[in-house]
């Protein structure tokens, strides 16, 4: 019997010695945990489905003697087998997990982030094995929604609709909305000196993805111009960049699958 049983998502794994695996998981009640899965590289007896990135289930942990907890069991709560067959869904899930791994810092309880990650992975998994789905246009929306949601639940999201200094309505003109990242986001006319201008539809789309119900947010994204989607992608990258410890390797993987010759490929980047 394990000392600790908790829901978890596998964020990252790394080989340790010949047969062991270091597994980094995200949990709702204990934040991010590094643990060791003894023998997981050599035998699948204890972890029959393996421990793929993005796998979700219940883990059993023992405290262990060193600084690492010992992962003694993993019971999947979701069928992840389709992931290995769908390169694109695999890339999405890889990105969601790598981003979470880099941005989530410690062991504080954060059920909101955990819930958002589970939801995003589940969405990506529903595409696995489907060549072309009605949700094709919504795929990048999933990434933007998760990026914004993750920044939000970690307290890293700048103000997007009211002045970050005083809370007054934003300074919006035909040139766009005043925005200064160093000052914390959108600015009112009083606090707008030195701020740059962001297109209002980009900020509106960000708010919709964050706050609207699933149908409304997917619809808004599908209807947005390509330029607005790209503006939002670039804004999200800009917001994430200062919090990264290393370049995101999964972004390079996106670029690779986008370069494949097959039709209907989608790099998820717009
Ligand atoms: Zn202000």
Image (cartoon, helix red, strand yellow):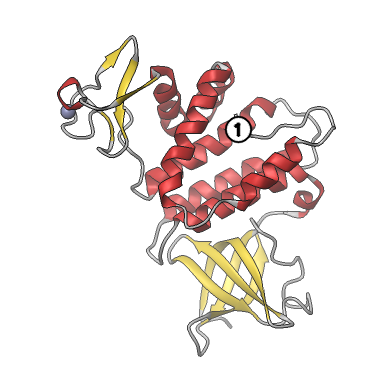
Q: Residue 58: horizontal and vertical position, in percent?
A: 59, 66
The outermost residue toward the bottom is: 65
Q: Is residue 107 left or right of residue 46?
A: left
Tag count? 1
Quadrant where ligand 1 appears: top left
Identified at 43% across, 18% down, the residue is 201
Q: Is residue 32 above or below residue 122?
A: below
Find residue 241 and report its image quarter: top left
Identified at 74% across, 67% down, the residue is 50
Local crowd size for mark 1, using a 10 Å CA cut-off: few (<14), some (14–19), many (≥20):
many
The outermost residue toward the top is: 174
Q: Is residue 129 above or below residue 270?
A: below
Quarter of the image with the C terminus in it: top right
Q: Is residue 250 left or right of residue 116?
A: right
Q: Residue 219: horizontal and vertical position, in percent?
A: 56, 21
Identified at 56% across, 26% down, the residue is 218
Disc 1 within 8 angstroms of ligand 1 (CB): no
Element assignment for label 1: helix
Q: Is residue 155 left or right of residue 241?
A: left
Q: Nearer the viewer, residue 1 or 191?
A: 191
Find residue 221 and report its image quarter: top right
Tell me the residue that label 1 is attached to: 140
Q: Nearer the viewer, residue 155 or 179?
A: 179
The outermost residue toward the right is: 262
Q: Residue 78: horizontal and vertical position, in percent?
A: 68, 54
The outermost residue toward the front is: 194
Quarter of the image with the N terminus in it: bottom right
Q: Residue 245: horizontal and vertical position, in percent?
A: 47, 57
Identified at 48% across, 83% down, the residue is 67
């Amino acid at each position: 019997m394990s000392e600790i049983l908790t829901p978890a998502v596998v964020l990252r794994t790394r080989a340790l010695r010949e047969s062991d695996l270091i597994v980094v998981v995200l949990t709702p009640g204990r934040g991010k945990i590094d643990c060791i899965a003894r023998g997981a590289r050599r035998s699948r007896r204890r972890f029959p489905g393996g421990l793929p990135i993005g796998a979700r289930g219940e883990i059993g942990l023992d405290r262990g003697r060193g600084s690492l907890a010992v992962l003694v069991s993993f019971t999947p709560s979701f069928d992840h087998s389709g992931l290995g067959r769908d390169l694109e869904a695999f890339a999405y899930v890889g990105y969601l997990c790598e981003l979470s791994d880099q941005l989530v810092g410690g062991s504080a309880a954060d059920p909101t982030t955990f819930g958002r990650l589970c939801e995003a992975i589940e969405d990506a998994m529903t595409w696995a094995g489907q060549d072309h789905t009605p949700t094709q246009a919504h795929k990048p929306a999933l990434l933007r929604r998760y990026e914004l949601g993750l920044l939000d639940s970690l307290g890293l999201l700048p103000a997007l609709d009211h002045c970050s200094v005083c809370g007054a309505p934003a300074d919006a003109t035909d040139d766009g909305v005043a925005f200064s990242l160093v000052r914390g986001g959108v600015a009112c006319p009083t606090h707008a000196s030195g701020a740059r201008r962001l297109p209002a539809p980009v900020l509106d789309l960000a708010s919709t993805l964050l706050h609207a119900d699933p149908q409304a947010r997917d619809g808004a994204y599908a209807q947005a111009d390509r330029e607005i989607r790209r503006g939002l992608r670039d804004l999200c990258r800009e917001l994430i960049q200062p919090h990264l410890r290393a370049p995101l390797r999964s972004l390079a993987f996106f670029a690779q699958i986008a370069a494949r010759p097959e039709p209907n490929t989608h790099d998820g980047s717009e």
